[in-house]
Image (cartoon, rainbow, N blue to C red):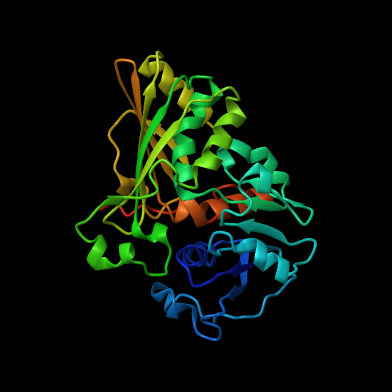
Amino acid sequence: MINIGIIGGSGYTAGELIRILMYHPNVNIDFVYSTTNSGKPLSVAHHDLMGDIEMNFTDVVNPDVNVVFLCLGHGKSISFLEENKFASHTKIIDLGNDFRLTKDAIFEGKEFVYGLPELNKAEIKKANYIANPGCFATAIQLALLPLAKNNLLKSDVHINATTGSTGAGVSLAETSHFSWRNNNMSHYKAFEHQHLGEINQSVNQLQADYSDELIFVPNRGDFTRGIFATLYTTSEESLEDLVVKYQDFYKNEPFVTVTTTNINMKQVVQTNKCIISLLKKGNRILITSIIDNLTKGASGQAVQNMNLMFGLEETTGLHLKPSGF
């Protein structure tokens, strides 16, 4: 069995990790670390776990686990790892943004691999340290990578993506209160969202000469989980040829589906799936990409990476049914 620890156990991504891993056939949850809830049952923070798992939060770290998931706020993983040392065999999967960019990938001799399986699967299988991608970044990269692979990005890409309230984390802010979110919508960090760095990095990994702009407007949606992203750019390729290129790029990727039909977010909520829809009008290609921000955009992808790192079938523990209705 793979003994795992979770750091930052009270948040949304940690809760999703627990839900997946407590039924994973190859995993034993050794500890869930939370200084705010130490000694209390997991169900204090994750109410739906009541009756499913009898375990308490702890403020003590077992440094000898096989893998540790860092579910800390962005920028906090480095300070935690400086203060808490793990065994040399312990693999680390960071769900924050501390190590996602190449310039930040090496820390205390540890080299973090960018953990987008559809891009870096071979490297992930050999890695000991993973920087899990951001949620918006996952949806947008999966929409763009087949174009970059075929050197088909020739102009600016316009991106509009809406995420649920869980994307803001468990700590309350004005814009995450029900009274503000309900029947409401707004954009934030337009043109300067922090995920643009990792998106551009991955695009340039496949199409090094791409220097046009990714024009990204992120939105807050009136729902709890999911990301609905639409992207458009110019393309002289026919829709039929584009579909073939997308399907070929993802032919060995179990969680990505390509279609030309209209799609809706409930097809992926509570799953590790990404569904991509292609539409062509004149010389413009519209790409729609949908994921669950907590699963494929965070915890599910982290488990997918763990499976690859330990030589397991990539889909183990991730056969999850969407909400549907």
What percent of the width, then of the height, locates residue 64? Answer: 75, 70
Asked if residue 318 shows in the view, the reply is: no
Asked if residue 49 shows in the view, the reply is: yes
What percent of the width, then of the height, locates residue 324? Answer: 29, 51
Q: How many numbered dots are placed on residues in this image?
A: 0
Position of residue 65 relative to residue 281, above or below, is below
Position of residue 250 relative to residue 11, above or below, is above
**Quadrant (top left/top right/bottom left/bottom right) for the N terminus:** bottom right
Position of residue 27 relative to residue 137, above or below, is below
Looking at the image, which residue is at 43% across and 42% down? 274
Towards the viewer: 220 or 229: 220
Task: Determine whether, in the image, residue 87 is placed left or right of residue 93.
Answer: right
Task: Determine whether, in the image, residue 21 is placed left or right of residue 219.
Answer: right
Determine the image quadrant of residue 232: top left
Towards the viewer: 286 or 296: 286
- Furthest toward the bottom, the residue is 39
Towards the viewer: 208 or 304: 208
What percent of the width, then of the height, locates residue 15? Answer: 47, 67
- Furthest toward the left, the residue is 183
Looking at the image, which residue is at 58% across and 30% down? 204
Looking at the image, which residue is at 57% across and 35% down? 202
Looking at the image, which residue is at 54% across and 82% down? 56
Determine the image quadrant of residue 71: bottom right
